[in-house]
Image: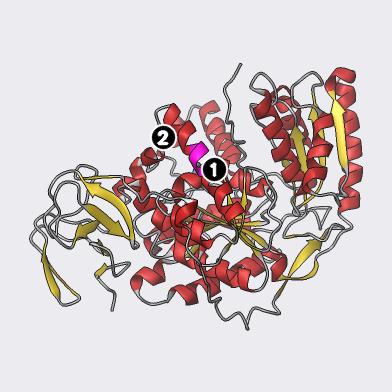
Amino acid sequence: MQHQVLKVHPADNVIVALRNFASGEQVDFEGETYELPIGVGVKHKFVTEDLQKGDAVTMYGVRVGRAMQPIRKGEPITTFNLKHDAEPYSIDKKQPYSWQPPDVTDWQNRTFLGYHRTDGQVGTANYWLVIPLVFCENRNILILKDAFERELGYSQPEIYRDQVREMLHLYQHGDMATVKKMQPFADPSIMNVFSKPVERPFKNIDGIKFLTHEMGCGGTRQDSEALCGLFAGFINNPNVAGVTVLSLGCQHTQASMLEPEIRKRNPKFNKPILVYEQQDGTEYAMLSTAVRETFLAIAEANKLERQPAPISKLTVGLKCGGSDGFSGLSANPVLGHLSDILVGVGGKTVLAEFPELCGVEQELINRTTSDEKAQKFITLMQDYSAKAEAVGSGFDMNPSPGNIRDGLITDAIKSAGAAKKGGMAPVADVLNYTEPAVAPGLSLLCTPGNDVEATTGMAGSGTNVILFTTGLGTPTGNPICPVVKVATNTALANRMPDVIDFDCGPIIEGTQTIEQNAEQLLEYVIKLASGEVQTKAQQLGQDDFIPWKRGVSL
């Protein structure tokens, strides 16, 4: 039978509602009866004892806030009676940490079919990348995109173009009455279009990915250098076969900066890089040459075929967005258990979003494998927090209206649940933005919580699959790294089937354990890594790319 409430940790003084409770209802839990003087919505929390102003609220076993006014036993916590507060952290408080890995016997010899690179990396896809070093080249990028995608079978189905064409035909024949009565296409019929096989001449090229951005010149040199580092990370990503680079010629982000950044990340790098500068001649000459030489390079990259590789070759990103009150109870712990399995077999996982680690810093410090890495984490967190506060926006302002509406009242509550994606494995490495994930095990990567800036940063650090939990629903994808959308609840999975790939709702419903659900998700990841399935974001062509701009424009 489905439980009605849940206490996450024995030390907590809040209880989570798993259904809506009306004012005046009684809740019997663990031998105690709670009178609810105020209605408590599903995913929200009520306190287990009378609290006075200044008393701490604990969830997931850590401090997540302090009462701003008296809160009676059974009353829900809200933005009006609770403020963000978290435990202080330091290297001096670092405690010894031991970890018992899960039993990975069934996963030890599992393989996926991937693209083996000469440097030893293995991709889950084989993409050709086309990038501009500066925003001046965005138009040329889009011209190339239209030409290659249409002719090589990578363009999206023209569902909405067909709809406009039909309406235009009716308008031209004076039949606006029919246009006004037209019904929108049903989602299932749209998805059937996406599921049809597409005839493509290059069978081993999963896509040609064209990026645009608003950087490369006019901002700080630091931002231009960071952009170059991000592109170097994308090019080095095991899912990329090679790259075509368009440059204007006079911008801050110079082509000459790109190869050193790549070599810094990977001395064994050996992929084709085609560079074209517009100021060397006419636009036509540049684009025509780029088309011919890119076509030849894609034909060569198409010769590579999928071959078996151990799942220890996977580098899996761990991300959440559009979170709700169930995120820390179902989907995030599922990712955590999956992460521990991959770490147990020698794979790599990457936990990002530093603003969403606020309040669990000490736990992560305790888990780091060295004091040096722990101090790097502290420095990155403190520097990031200080910069946010300098512009009047501290980490405590991180929860969005949607987060708050669905039970994530403070950033510490959100963070304590978000950190569950990292499982319990030791922290093997701490990475600044765009630094490559090379150490087997769990790495912490400094990125914003912003969905696309975070997934962009993770792909730049080498993830070849990203697992993305959501309780509210988000279409976020990535050009080179498949993004698996994992629902925290079945209602969301049913409401947005064109976005959600996997459902953790059975955990909330009490029909599956976290471990069972995580193993099902890992089976899905292996199929995805082998090219047997595509994520919904891939089917929809959801290629989101936003570099993290840290500086100011000049």
Residue that sits furthest to the bottom in the current view: 105
Residue beneath the point at 64% across and 78% down: 107
Q: Are marks 1 and 2 in contact (CB under 8 Å)?
A: no
Q: Quadrant of the N terminus?
A: bottom left
Identify the residue at horizontal 20%, vertical 76% (top origin).
30
Q: Is residue 460 visible?
A: yes
**Label located before the other in sequence (1 or 2):** 2
Q: Quadrant of the image for the C terminus?
A: top right
Q: Which residue is mark 1?
A: 379
Q: Secondary structure at mark 2?
A: helix
Instruction: Say left or right for 362 vs 16.
Output: right
Q: Which residue is mark 2?
A: 180
Which residue is outermost to the front? 92
Q: Is residue 486 magenta?
A: no
Q: Is residue 486 visible?
A: no
User: Identity of the amino acid at label 2?
Assistant: Lys
Q: Quadrant of residue 456?
A: top right
* Magenta region, residue range: 379-384
Calculate the distance from the C-alpha at mark 1 to the C-alpha at mark 2.
59 Å
Find residue 3 and report its horizontal and vertical position in percent: 27, 73
Most frequent secondary structure within the magenta stretch: helix
Residue furthest to the top in view is 554
Question: In the image, which disc is placed on residue 61?
Answer: none
Foreground of the two, 174 or 388:
388
Relative to the observer, which residue lies in front, 543 or 33? 33
380 part of magenta stretch: yes
- Element on which disc 1 rests: helix
Q: Amino acid at mark 1?
A: Thr
Q: How is the image coloured?
A: secondary structure
Q: Position of residue 483 (x, y in %)?
A: 59, 54
Image x and y of residue 204, in percent: 81, 57
Q: Position of residue 423 (x, y in %)?
A: 50, 65
